[in-house]
Amino acid sequence: MSYLILSIVILLIGILGIILNRSNLIIMLMCVELILLASTILLLFESRVLYTLSGQIFAIVILTVAAAESAIGLAIMVNYYRLRGTIAVRALNLLRG
């Protein structure tokens, strides 16, 4: 039962971090990673309770997607910082094409 509470707490921290900090993209990316981590913990808890392997397989898939998302997001942020000199969310309106 403690895994369920841990997952909910991590999920709420991630959502609260996105809501409260809307100025820095790196912190927002870390909060999205926390949300993905919470869903992974929840799937592993479900897999342990129901004695199935599907939760573990989905957890591996989520971790793989989260790693790829982090790498791509950080690469985009580094390039944007080199181009504009800031990664503030307020400056993103310059991305219109």
Image (cartoon, grey):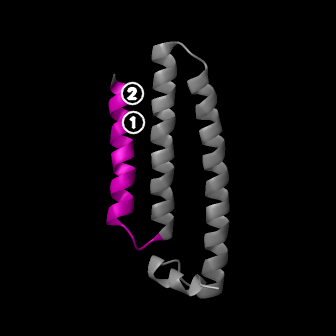
Quarter placement of the N terminus: top left
Residue bearing the label numbered 1: 7
Q: Nearer the viewer, residue 31 or 43?
A: 43
Q: Amino acid at mark 2?
A: Tyr
Residue 38 vertical placement versus 4 (above, below): below
- Looking at the image, residue 93 sits to the left or right of residue 11; the answer is right
How far across and down, in percent of the image, does residue 39 sit? 48, 38
Q: Position of residue 56 (x, y in %)?
A: 59, 26
Tally of marks: 2
The residue range painted magenta reads 2-24
- Circle 1 packing at 10 Å, graded few (<14), some (14-19), many (20+), is many
- Classified by dominant secondary structure, the portion drawn in magenta counts as helix
Q: What residue lies at 53% left-to-right and 12% top-to-bottom?
A: 51
In the picture, the disc for residue 3 is: 2
Relative height, residue 17 to residue 75 (above, below): above
- Residue at image location 39% in from the left, 61% down from the top: 18
